[in-house]
Image (cartoon, rainbow, N blue to C red):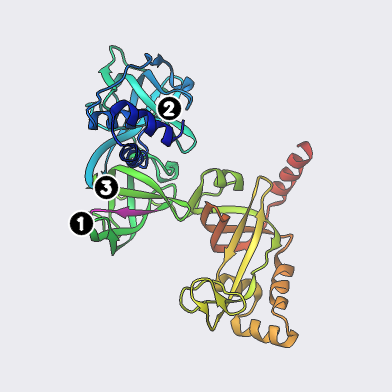
Amino acid sequence: MDIDSHAEELASALGVDKTEVKDDLENLLQYSVPIDEAKQSVRRKHGGGTTESVTPESVSIRDISTEHNSVNVTVRVLNVGTRTIRYQGEDNTIREGTFADETGTISYTSWQDFGFEAGDSITIGNANIREWDGNPELNLGANTTVAFADETVTVPYAVGGDATLLELEPGDRGQNVEVRVLAVETRTINGRDGETEILSGVLADETTKLPFTDWQPRSEIEPGASIRIEDTYIREFRGVPSVNLSEFSTVTSLETPVQVTENAPRMAIADALDAGGMYDVEVVGTVLEVRDGSGLIERCPECGRVIQNGQCRSHGAVEGKDDLRIKAIIDDGTDALTAILGTELTTTVYGGDISDAKDAAREAMDKEVVSSAIAERLEGRLYRVRGNLSVDEYGANLNADEFERFAESPHDAATAALLEVEQ
């Protein structure tokens, strides 16, 4: 049933204008309120009360699917995060995190405070189901009941929300991390309440580095500080996970410095892509092809975008600024990505700077001579690439900070060859 049908059904039952009902539903749905919960809210607004419904099924987490409207379930609370969202001009506090039982885990959003905390075992009645990021999620609202269970629900998962930076994924809520602040800056943005001052920068622990945003700047967050942050939520920013601090997050200074890795985690390309983007990662693979748009290029002097025939998509006709770039397809046998090398790395690979590239292109009367020389040096050879991996609608792109030939040991090469034969 589409939203028009739901609105017409409600308007008829309540004796109110369909347009008003539809507007109310759309306002609720844009905040991912489940349709059944949204309809109940609209009924209450217009004095219609509630309607009788089928008794929800009692299920384990493994059996919950988006085909369910609502369920009853007994779970262990793994973590609890608190955040404020704005709905119809008013701030509303929600609680969110992860539940578990012996069969699996599921994320949840609670639209009111039922009093449970991490580690509690609870029985939930009439929890609505919505789809979130392709998976079912429990939504606890006004028609939901929560009771503390008589026995502890035993689960094979850590309770409390502590995690390393490498374990964090976009969509995680109520997470706690112990990190060192590598970089921080104060910025002013145009927020929902006008100009807002925030902190942004880079955090690190012994596993990796991630960007962060503190929406209510805290004095404890300063370069070099080792801190414990509790109740963070993770968003995707430019294709990588980003740690976000809300007004409910807490920051505590640590006496013992947090150990920070100097190395990026080396991963198979397929595993890195499955992670959905990484701020700092290293892969090793063969350069299959140097793509079009490599070599001597021109950029817009205003925005820095690559231009074609003197035309920028944002600024129209411009006088381009010469630059060097490489876009190389890297394959390690598990998957492939595009490594993007900026001016400095491209200069090293090419063996000359922008002036040298312009001289070569002028002599050959063809810019492609530069990309052809680069392709001759790279294609078919094994390289180690480290940088920032984004996975989005534009594909998988690794913006390289480091790029160098990778020399396999004879033992590693022989082992890889044997494995390939066996497969």
The quarter holding residue 153 reads: top left
On screen, residue 341 versus residue 75, left or right, reads right
Q: CA distance from mark 2 to mark 3?
A: 24 Å
Check whether the beta carbons of the residues at disc 3 and disc 1 lie within 8 A of each other: no
Residue 220 position, x and y percent, is: 22, 54
The quarter holding residue 124 reads: top left
Which circle marks residue 246 in the picture? 3
Mark 2 Cα-neighbour bin, 10 Å: few <14, some 14–19, many ≥20: many
Query: Which SS type dominates the magenta stretch?
Result: strand
Amino acid residing under circle 2: Thr
Q: Secondary structure at mark 1?
A: loop
Residue 407 position, x and y percent, is: 67, 57
Tally of numbered discs: 3
The quarter holding residue 194 reads: bottom left
Q: CA distance from mark 3 to mark 1?
A: 15 Å
For the C terminus, the quadrant is top right
In front: 321, or 282? 321
Amino acid residing under circle 3: Ser
Q: Is residue 212 magenta?
A: yes
Residue 91 position, x and y percent, is: 22, 44
Please determine whether, in this image, residue 373 is positioned above or below residue 47.
below
Q: CA distance from mark 2 to mark 1?
A: 36 Å
The stretch of residues the image draws in magenta is 211-216
Residue 267 position, x and y percent, is: 57, 47
Q: Which residue is mark 2?
A: 105
Q: Secondary structure at mark 2?
A: strand
Q: Earlier in the sequence, mark 2 or mark 1?
A: 2
Foreground mark, 2 or 1, reads 2
Amino acid residing under circle 1: Ser
Q: Earlier in the sequence, mark 2 or mark 3?
A: 2
Check whether the beta carbons of the residues at disc 2 and disc 3 lie within 8 A of each other: no
On screen, residue 196 versus residue 208, left or right, reads left
